[in-house]
Image (tube, helix red, strand yellow):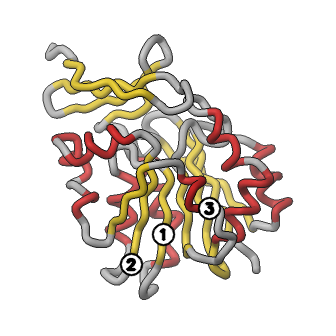
Amino acid sequence: MTPWIELDVAPIPNNGGELILSQRGNEFSISLKGKRGELMNSRVYHSEKQLSKLGCAYLRETDNAKVLIGGLGMGYTLASALNILKNSAEVTVAELVPEVVEWNQGPLGACAKYPLQDTRTQVHVGDVKDLLTSNEPTYDAILLDVDNGPRGLTHSDNNWLYSEEGLNSINDNLRPQGMLAVWSAGPDYLFSVRLKNIGFDVITHIVHSRGGKKGDEHSIFLARKTQ
């Protein structure tokens, strides 16, 4: 069997650990250093694509749609959103770890067909929270594939996104009838309740990491702004 080759290591801000980019043939993996396991793999990306398909579906015929994606990963969520949206759309992707952006600009980018090169894409290197403080209705959809979902694993500051304060800011930054879509490694009933308490209409979809009914079950929370 072809061995894994470690290509690079990147620190996660605020003592979140280190990310390791590895390659085996045409397969790439991003994992947490130590025994904390693989975060993503270039052969397992169905649920990341579903995040965009579900979150952006209603924008397929919308001119000048504005979408914010929290978390670049291997680019599959971004690529899927671009495939749905019209040429007049603008997609901003926020990535906390600068090296992840660099990896996607290199050979890793081929996995999702280099979505960073799309002219509709803008990159914010930093915390997605930085783009959610204006309290102005800016985005038609906000897609969050940050950390492990509502229960942070690598970066404690991510917890703000899923708190009542963070969700209120997200609600303020969404345009009327805007959509918040959140990827999660598993179900989280209390998070659904929190979304409803903010005033979102909430539907939870169960999707599999490999498509169909194959692979791990992940949750996609769809929260529609009601005002």
Mark 1, secondary structure of its residue:
strand
Do tag 2 and tag 1 residues touch (Cβ < 8 Å)? yes
**Residue sitting at 18 percent across and 47 percent down?**
110
The residue that mark 1 highlights is: 67
Mark 2, secondary structure of its residue:
loop
Residue 79 as seen in the image, left or right of residue 212: left
Nearer mark to the viewer, of 3 and 1: 3
The residue that mark 3 highlights is: 132
Name the N-terminal-most of marks 3 and 1: 1
**Residue sitting at 72 percent across and 41 percent down?**
188
Judge the density around disc 1: few (<14), some (14-19), many (≥20) Cα neighbours within 10 Å: many
The image position of residue 113, as x and y in percent, is: 21, 54
The residue that mark 2 highlights is: 89
Name the N-terminal-most of marks 2 and 1: 1
The image position of residue 1, as x and y in percent, is: 15, 13
- Figure check: 11 above or below 148: above
What amino acid does circle 3 point to? Leu
> What whole-number distance in Å separates the C-alpha atoms at marks 3 and 2?
19 Å
> What whole-number distance in Å separates the C-alpha atoms at marks 3 and 1?
12 Å
Residue 4 as seen in the image, left or right of residue 141: left
